[in-house]
Amino acid sequence: MPSEIANCINRLTPVVNTTDAKKVPGLGTPQDVYLYCLQQFVWRADMVRWEDYDITKKDKDFVNGLLASMMNPTGETNSRNKRQVGVFNPPVTGFRIRREYRVLNDTERNAFHSVLRTMKTNGEYDMFANLHMGGVSTSAHGGPNFFGWHRVYLVLLEEAMRRIDRTVSLPYWDSTLDFEMDNPANTILFSTEFLGNGYGFVTTGPFANWTTSQGQLRRNIAGGSRLMTRNAINLILTRCRTRQISRPTATATYDLELEHGGPHVWVGGQMQGLNTAAHDPIFFLHHAFIDNIWERFRVRQSSACGVNPSIDYPSATGQHAPNRIMDGIPEYRNIDGYSNYWTTNWFNYEPALSCPSCGASPYIRCNTARNVCVSIARTLVPQEGALVGGTLAFSPAETASSIDAVEARELEAILDVGPVFAAPPAEPRTQRGQMARMAEAARLGNASRP
């Protein structure tokens, strides 16, 4: 018997029919243990098709090295050589708190940008982006594994980031701050000091001229769908069971995965496609916010609903089955992403921003009339070097024009992003919303003619 299988059986068999067995659901008999350990070995040996993810041997070794430090059991028992089941190592780089991107001060934000640029240069960023493709388009989307797979995925990326700079944590993009603006397309996010320009090829900011699997990074902000809304989030947070907010069992009103598709399509470019989205760094900020919402939902499950979120994995078969191995992330099963362990030992989030302080950020203001936090807009200034929002300077070229949007749509039309995210309908302030209004006006005008 291969030593890996023998070690796994020796480790798990003593806890069958004990309270510790509950930490590994489905292992009720010695036969279950044998089949589980055999599956783990066979999967590691034969089923990891790294070529499906355009992953090199160097990339594979890097991922497996990260996972090895994350997955090795910890917590000594009575024997020096025996360890508890289902308890994993705390992060090598320490516990981290995730904050809204605009709440970071200039030094913190620039450190985050610097780490991503380093990862882009050494190939690690593209490796992570390439993991979000292939089989993942169905096994990590369209079902309950959507939440857990992306949680582990973000943890992996964040750990890689912190091995470069331990002061850095993955920030999140609260797109409700932009939705609350008069015109979300004018958000300060798409400026030199934040994410770079939002129309056409990305040629400004920290990710200027980045290349992807589908050519140069490009965007077409406010092209379609909509950003996250406070109302949609609040409705989701009224539910108690994961099946009520996850596909395919959630209704549209409470479907968090459907809502998550809105910002993907709204940003446009590579971000709108399942196979290409992760090549735009805004992807990870957006998914950190989706994970934030899910965590708020999980806290409410425990505090108000009497539901244990770690075992509230909806009934599913096939690629979303709870005990199926996660695609592209060796060692983890789908249900492992639901463990309370992550926010207990690895990361958590600052509380949601609220008036009047709104995180004490110069880039977010409190709309006192509606008592909501709102992003400030990019501002056209007469010359370089003027201060905006307290510390930043912008050039006239960073203010979007109708020509920018036209060119961005043309560049987007020739971009092969594969399957596009399911998303809510376009809101009136988007390009598609405006074109729909123009088409409707023309239709009514034609109908009124004799």
Image (cartoon, rainbow, N blue to C red):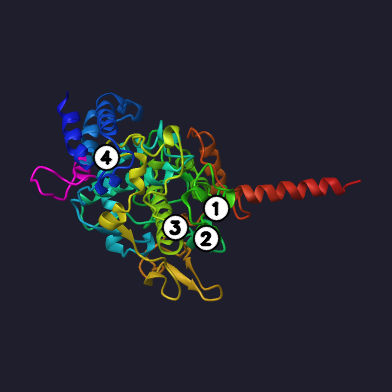
Give the distance between the C-alpha atoms of the residues marked 4 and 1, in whole angstroms.
Answer: 35 Å
Residue 67: image location, x then y, percent? 23, 40
Specify which label sits upstream in the sequence, 4 or 1: 4
Instruction: Look at mark 1 in the image and give the residue it sits on.
Output: 254
Instruction: Look at mark 4 in the image and give the residue it sits on.
Output: 124
Specify which label sits upstream in the sequence, 2 or 1: 2
Instruction: Inspect the image, locate mark 1, and give the three-letter code of the amino acid beneath it.
Output: Tyr
Give the distance between the C-alpha atoms of the residues marked 4 and 2, in whole angstroms.
Answer: 39 Å
Query: Which stretch appears magenta?
Result: 68-85
Specify which label sits upstream in the sequence, 2 or 3: 2
Give the distance between the C-alpha atoms of the residues marked 2 and 1, in whole angstroms.
Answer: 9 Å
User: Which secondary structure lies at badge 4?
Assistant: helix
Instruction: Look at mark 3 in the image and give the residue it sits on.
Output: 297
Residue 66: image location, x then y, percent? 22, 42
Q: Is residue 198 left or right of residue 435?
A: left
User: Which secondary structure lies at badge 3?
Assistant: helix
Q: As drawn, which residue projects farthest toward the right? A: 450
Instruction: Look at mark 2 in the image and give the residue it sits on.
Output: 238
Residue 266: image location, x then y, percent? 52, 49
User: Which secondary structure lies at badge 1?
Assistant: helix
Quadrant position of the N terminus in the picture: top left
Q: In this view, does 99 lie above or below 39?
A: below
Magenta span: chief secondary structure: loop
Magenta stretch: includes residue 191: no
Q: Are dots 3 and 1 in contact, CB under 8 Å?
A: no
Res. 275 in view: no
Q: In this view, does 280 lie to the left or right of 105?
A: right
Instruction: Inspect the image, locate mark 4, and give the three-letter code of the amino acid beneath it.
Output: Glu
